[in-house]
Each structure stands twice: as C-alpha cells, then as structure tokens.
Amino acid sequence: MTGLYPPVEPYDQGMLDVGDGNLVYWEACGNPEGKPAVVLHGGPGSGAGSFWRRLFDPEAYRIVLFDQRGCGRSVPDAADPETSLAANTTAHLIADTERLREHLGVERWLVIGGSWGVTLGLAYAEAHPDRVSELVLFSVTNTTRREVTWVTRDMGRIFPEEWARFRDTVPEAERDGSLVDAYARMLEDPDPSVRETAAREWCRWEDVHVSTDPGHEPDPRFDDPRFRMRFARLVTHYWRHAGFVEDGALLRDAANLAGIPGVMIHGRLDISGPADIAWNLAQVWKDAELVLISNEGHGISGDATAEAIVAATDRFAR
C-alpha cells in the first residue's frame, strides 16, 4: 500500500491500571518530543495493530497506541468466557483515554480513529474538547441503533445469501427480532460449541458486509479462534447498547467540537457505513473537512484512503 511511512517500533510501552481489574496495554512510537497523537482502534475489539504507526511521520509525532479494555494485549481478555464485560462501556474507555493522557503527561493530542474508533473519538472529543488538538477520522460511524439495524438486517438486501446464513445461525424464534441481541446471548452460552459457532458466523458476516470495494480481501485475523471470540463478544456487547451513547447524541453534541480542526475520510463504497453519517456530521462540525474516496470502501481498503489519512496527519504536524 502506498503513502504509508516505514514501520517503526515502540520506544516505550507499559500496562496501565485503569481500575475494575483492568490493565490496559499502551505503547509510544516516533519522536518522544514530537506532537502527541493517540490512536483509537476499531472493532470494538480489534486492538491497535502496528499499521497505525505508519499513518504518522515518526520524526514529527509522538504516536501513542493502546488496546481498549478486553482486547489485544490488555487484560483480562474478552476472548475468555469468564471475563465480565460489565465494566466495559464507552464511558470507561473515555476515562481510560484520559487516564493514559495524564499518565504520559500530555496536555493535548491529536486523536485518530477508524470505524468504531470514530464513535469513540467523537465521544471523547465532545466530552474533553480542551484535550483534543485535531481529529482525523475515517470510516465514519456513530454506532446508532439505526446503524446497527442497517448492518445486521438491512445489509441483507445487498448480500441476501450470506445474510440468510447469518440470520439462520440464531434460534428460529429469535430470527425476526434483534440479531445482535441473539448473537450476544449465544456468545455467553455455557456450551462452548454454541459460543464458537456464534463467533465464527458473526465474524463471517463482518467480513462480508465490508466487502463492497474491489480491493477487499478476507481479514486473516478471523482465522484465529481467540480473536474471533474477543471481537464478536465486544462488538455485540457495544452494538446491542448502541455504543453506550444516547441515540443521536454524537451528532447533536458535535457543536462541542467547534474550534477543533478535523478531517473525515470516507469511502463511497462503504455501504455498511453509509456516507450520510459523515456528511451529516460535517454540516454541524464546521471545522471539519470531509474527503470522500470514490472507489474504496470500509477501513483502509486502498491507496487513496491511506494517502488521504497521511496527508491529514502531515498537515496537522505542521
């Protein structure tokens, strides 16, 4: 993929005690004296992979990555069925982000997020606008109930065969109700075979509904049973609660972002996350630039999206 900076390794890392029995893994890369930036990864549950480091000029930025509660290198791991998700909400993640900022002695930082990381980034910035210097957001989502229904039911109009398999995995009596609730219940079933079937089929559908751009390739992480379980448990947990945010509040409170420069990058082929989400936000958040990528979809699915993100971080570095 073109446009990315070369790989870099962390110069510092640690485990931050954020309470509730949770230790959050964090790392810092690039220039210790550079402009601070924090990565809010997607999923929920994906973890902050090393590719995020390459979205920044390592000479200009102090790049901070962390794995959100329950995922990746943070503990306890949501892949373990005994791990409770009761203390894993958006409010907890916002507080963790603030605790990490204070721990690292950062006054203000650029916030970058993709997909679920956009929802979290907006919630964090609207709660703590004085701590955010800029926002770079791609694959823009708000995790509203309408968006969850769109992905789990309406996208069946685009992929009818694959969606029928996704629907028919849940018990017949639940197929006309909330599919995300049904999957969440299956993922907590005492029978490990029920849990594994739910995780596998949830992740299979995840790979389908983001596959609308020509460059899409199946996500190899879904081959790992522990990643599948972690990802499915956390996504269904957050989605069934509409991201633990009052429905419509992120758009309503976007006025709190006044004075914070931002760039939102969104692929027109991202049908699972329609472009109107970003467009509506741009009508309220006047300090944001909206960049629509014609032939790319969800995530960093091609060179144009990667180049647009790096162009934004380069600009804010100056």
Image: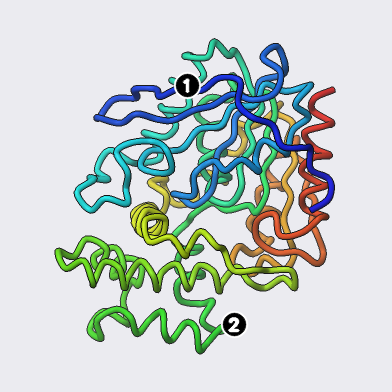
Which amino acid type corresponds to the residue marked 2 in the rendered image?
Ile
Q: Quadrant of residue 303?
A: bottom right
Mark 2 → mark 1, Cα distance in angstroms:
41 Å
Query: Residue 262 vs residue 221: left or right?
Result: right
Q: Which residue is mark 1?
A: 100
Q: Which residue is mark 2?
A: 158
At x 51% / y 77%, what residue is drawn? 154
Mark 1 packing: few (<14 Cα in 10 Å), some, or many (20+)? many
Query: Residue 292 vs residue 89: left or right?
Result: right
Q: Which secondary structure, mark 1?
A: helix
- Location of residue 37 in the rendering, given as x and y in whole percent from the top left corner: 65, 26
Q: Which secondary structure, mark 2?
A: loop
- Location of residue 8 in the rendering, given as x and y in whole percent from the top left corner: 69, 31
Query: Residue 174 vs residue 92: left or right?
Result: left
* N-term mark: 2 or 1: 1
Mark 2 packing: few (<14 Cα in 10 Å), some, or many (20+)? some
- Location of residue 302 in the rendering, given as x and y in whole percent from the top left corner: 77, 59
Which amino acid type corresponds to the residue marked 1 in the rendered image?
Leu
Find the residue positioned furthest to the bottom. Answer: 161
Q: Quadrant of the C terminus?
A: top right
- Location of residue 224 in the rendering, given as x and y in whole percent from the top left corner: 43, 60
Query: Residue 290 vs residue 212: left or right?
Result: right
At x 55% / y 19%, what residue is drawn? 12
- Mark closer to the observer (2, 1): 1
Find the residue positioned furthest to the left. Answer: 190
Q: Quadrant of residue 136?
A: top right
Where 260 sits versus 84, above or below? above
At x 49% / y 52%, what residue is drawn? 43
